[in-house]
Amino acid sequence: MLDIKIIENDKTWELPEESKLGFGRYFTNHMFIMDYNKEQGWHDARIVPFGNISLHPASTVLHYGAEIFEGLKAYRRLSDGKVQLFRPLENIRRMNVSAERLCLPTIPEEDALQCYTEFICHEQAWVPKTEGTSLYIRPFMFGNDPYLGVHGVNEAVFMIIASPSGSYYKEGINPVKIMIEGEDVRAVKGGTGHIKCGGNYAASTRAGDKAEKQGYSQVLWLDGVERKYIEEVGAMNVMFKINGEIVTPALSGSILPGITRKSCIEVLSDMGYTVSERRLSVDELFAAMENGTLEEAWGTGTAAVVSPIGELRYGDVCYTVNGGKIGTVTQTLYDTLTGIQWGKIADNKGWTYEI
Ligand code: PLP
Ligand code: COI
């Protein structure tokens, strides 16, 4: 058991009304911090007033991008007002995989769960109440050695901040427009595409900005070798219903193994669908759009939940999916997942974790 010290914040602040929260703009008034060095291991766990942190100008994270993060949500159950998390151990395990890849220290699962739980319990008054809102939790870790040689990390910091949030896209549950990126690539097998590290997102911003300028919410990445196969969207995994078959790109080593993806595959199998985790080429996808067999497309992610895709563009070719409307499978997935998360339907899978 970690000994987590608490320093209360004597300041607090007002949030806008829950319908105007947006995503990741407002924060609770505390944050969690824990330090690591090779001699002491993880130590000095504390919940402190939310505020700026100070870093050595040579800190590893500032020069070599040694940073990893996670994203999960705390929901206020509509049935009884209690607060619950969705599959937190999955995030904890994935963060350890990310840490191992970037030579950052791992955190024992039970210690990480204790950090999440005590921090969120302390901040629980900030979990919004309206359906569709949640407290978005952002655990992150960075290398913090104060010298410039390129090296594995000897000193690190683990932190958690939390943001009362509404929907990720301004469209909410309405279909989003996605642009397929043909120039930049996000990841290759053997790189860092399968982990959640800040560098992946830094490298994808240029394409994201280009898409946004043209009215698209995010980009859909193609594989980095042949630039032929569908990988994932900027902040979501993707699924398609083609002629009755549900297809999602296989976890090839260059895409993030999404927790929402994994959960959707299970819900879909309960619905009687077998999900094909396989390669899907952009040619196959466009042929399906042309011959009318692409029935639905959607993205899955913690921030984005289940997000219908209403339009797909690749270069000059642009198709509307399902008449620009949410399809029945997408809607059922959204209703089932959010139903479990907001405590509207029974969780018979053991996915929720009450705080
Ligand atoms: N892919 C990327 C690149 C992401 O950033 C995310 C969001 O976390 C996902 C997929 C979906 O992962 P998860 O469902 O675990 O949130
Ligand atoms: C999440 O869904 O939790 C993410 O991390 C996506 C994001 C980069 C906002």
Image (tube, helix red, strand yellow):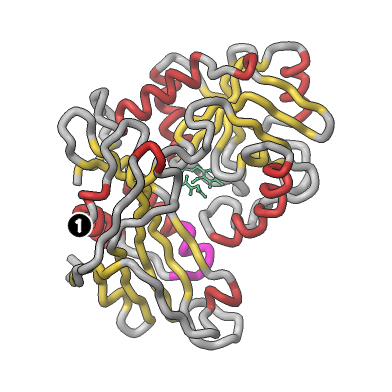
Q: Is residue 158 left or right of residue 48?
A: right
Residue 226 horizontal/vertical position (percent):
79, 43
Mark 1, secondary structure of its residue: helix
In this rendering, would 184 be left or right of 14? right
Q: Residue furthest left?
A: 80
- Res 10 quadrant in image: bottom left
Q: Which residue is mark 1?
A: 122
**Relative to 56, does residue 282 appear above or below in the rendering?**
above
Residue in the image at 53% along x and 31% along y: 171
Residue 90 visible in the picture: no
Confirm if mark 1 falls within 8 A of ligand 2. no
Query: Which residue lies most toward the right here?
Result: 316
Q: Nearer the viewer, residue 71 or 192?
A: 71
Of residues 240 and 170, which is closer to you in this image? 170
Q: Position of residue 118 (x, y in %)?
A: 21, 58
Q: Find the magenta span and give its range.
A: 97-104
- The residue shown at (60%, 61%) is 199
Q: Residue at 67% x, 37% y: name it.
A: 216
